[in-house]
Every structure is written in C-alpha cells, then in structure tokens.
Amino acid sequence: MAADPALAAFLSLTDDAALAYAEARAEALGLALPLAVRAGVIDNLILLRRQAETFIAALPADGPPAEAFEP
C-alpha cells in the first residue's frame, strides 16, 4: 500500500529526529512543548511510528486506499 506523503514522512523519522518533529508540530499548532513532558512525547511518537509501520505492513497491497494521515 502506498502511504500518503505525510504518513511516509512520519514513517521515515528516526528516533533521533522525533524531538525535532515534535517541536515543529507543536510550533505549527501554536502549542508549547514544556520541558517536563518532552521525554514522554518523544517516547509516544516513537511508539506511534512503530505501530503505524506495523499496521501499514499488514494492509493488503490491492485493498482499498487507507484514509489520509493527519498527525
């Protein structure tokens, strides 16, 4: 299954790039990312990325298109 561009970008993140991604998303949404919660946010993003990889891998290539990814 081909992923939409936003999902493909999210799936291509490395663990080391998760902080920069979280900070950029927070800024784009006008949110503060307090220092006290950053480690938890990064852990959750890494877990979410791994789960998304698993789900995408399980989708049949010839199945219906998946919904667009909106982080």
Image (tube, rainbow, N blue to C red):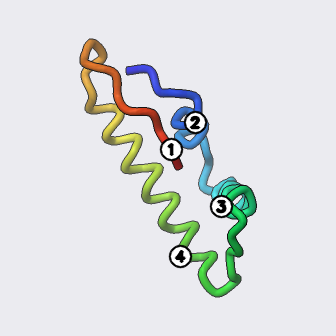
Mark 2 → mark 1, Cα distance in angstroms: 7 Å
Q: Amino acid at mark 3?
A: Ala
CA–CA distance in space, label 1 to label 3: 14 Å
Mark 2 or 1, which is nearer the eye?
1
Point out which mark residue 6 bears: 2
Residue underneath mark 1 = 70
Seen in the image, is 19 located left or right of residue 60?
Answer: right
Which numbered disc covers residue 22?
Answer: 3
Q: Which mark is residue 24?
A: none
Across and down, in percent, residue 43 comes to 51, 68
Q: Nearer the viewer, residue 46 or 21?
A: 21
User: Which amino acid type is shown beneath numbered disc 1?
Assistant: Glu
Q: Are marks 2 and 1 in contact (CB under 8 Å)?
A: yes
- Mark 4, residue position: 40
Please report whichever mark, 4 or 3, sits nearer to the chain's N-terminal start.
3
Q: Position of residue 6 (x, y in %)?
A: 57, 36
Front: mark 4 or 3: 3
- Number of numbered discs overlaid on the protein picture: 4
